[in-house]
Image (tube, rainbow, N blue to C red):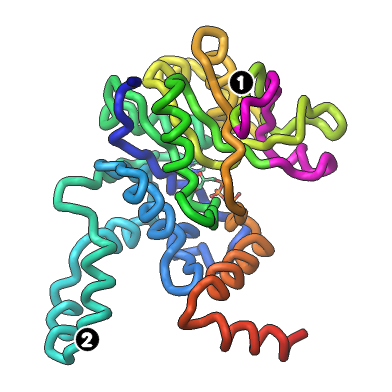
Amino acid sequence: MPARIRKAVFPVAGLGTRFLPATKSMPKEMLTVVDRPLIQHVVDEAREAGIEHLIFVTGRNKGVIEDHFDRQPELEETLAARGKTAALETLAECLPEAGAASFIRQQAPLGLGHAVWCAREIVGDEPFAVILPDVLVQAPDKGCLAQMLDVYNSRGGNILAVEPVPDDQTQNYGVVATGGADGNVFPVTGMVEKPEPGTAPSNLTILGRYILQPEIFGLLSEQGAGSGGEIQLTDSMLTLLETQHFFAVEYEGRAFDCGSKAGFLAANVAFAIDRADLRDTVVAEIKKLL
Ligand code: UTP
């Protein structure tokens, strides 16, 4: 049995320029899908998968994320005095156990690879998960990370969640080259970040969920800037692929790229109509608009 995955890293230090002016003073990761911030959705996914320690890589202007995962005694007292038990329960269930969340600063947004590297001291010498909060996965049964852990527990190595996209969209993503599929699992033979149109090795794109071995940190510390002038996680994973196994998992469910406006709005509709308390009214409102 491979070493247990106990820790998840959430890179939340990006500038969120695609959502300006909303993200001028509010972190992109606090934008809400229905009534939970993006970051809460992915923390829920991690906790469902059995993750015990949450590591947030934050930056300037992100203090409110830290507050979100802390208690709010005044608010709690007011809710209790007014008998708002359901609201109190919601707050309690969102709160990590004391000591189970760490916050570290990426002092400059030099790229996803650099953000992950900033977590090296807290992760230490054990395999860990990375979850991007701007990708939400609506899964029918088990969350995306839990599905990846099923594969990891039987095969070990490094695991990437992948999703097929139309061929003309591969240039927007990290793309994997793979060997033959075993069910929904593909051995990874190569990776490229944002390939030139027409040059992608497949249409399977890396989605924002990773299980990585700690050797990635040594490679990230020497990684130069890549695509977009940023330190890219994909470039170091490609080097790690020379000595370790990577498996791509085509998970069950649907992903929403909440870093883009259309993906974010689609996620709000999809998550709302998935809720018994909202479905009918939201569907009626959408029909009126159309
Ligand atoms: P994005 O590539 O979506 O970048 O980052 P961004 O800065 O958040 O948004 P845009 O493109 O300017 O609109 C994916 C995830 O990685 C984090 C972001 O916070 C986001 O959760 N990230 C990105 C970092 O933590 N540090 C970085 O240097 C870059």
Residue 230 image offset from top left, x and y in percent: 58, 32
Question: Residue 183 colored magenta?
Answer: yes
Q: Is residue 61 left or right of residue 170?
A: left
Badge 2 amino acid: Lys
Q: Can you tell which mark lies on residue 84?
A: 2
Pick whichever, 109 or 284, lies toward us. 284
- Classify residue 7 as left or right of residue 176: left
208 displayed left or right of 108: right
Q: How many marks?
A: 2
- Asked whether, in this view, residue 89 is left or right of residue 119, the answer is left
Residue at the farthest front position? 183
Residue 135: which disc? none
Quarter residue 145 falls in:
top left
Residue at 14% from the left image edge and 84% from the top image edge: 80
Q: Residues within 10 Å of mark 2 (few under 14, many from 20)?
A: few
- Which residue occupies 64% across, 57% down? 260
Q: Which residues are magenta?
A: 164-184
Nearest the eye: 231 or 158: 158
Query: Residue 270, position in %: x, y?
Result: 60, 68
Instruction: Residue 239: give x, y in percent of width and height.
Output: 56, 14
- Write the residue at 48% across / 66% down: 31
Q: Earlier in the sequence, mark 2 or mark 1?
A: 2
Residue 173 appears in view: yes
SS at circle 1: strand
**Residue 2 vertical position relative to residue 97 in the rendered view, above or below:** above
What residue type is disc 1 on?
Pro
Q: Which residue is outermost to the top?
A: 243
Q: In x, y percent, where is residue 139?
A: 53, 54
x 43%, y 65%: residue = 37
Task: Write down the residue under mark 1.
Answer: 187
**SS at circle 2:** loop
Q: Between marks 2 and 1, how big is the CA–CA gap?
A: 50 Å
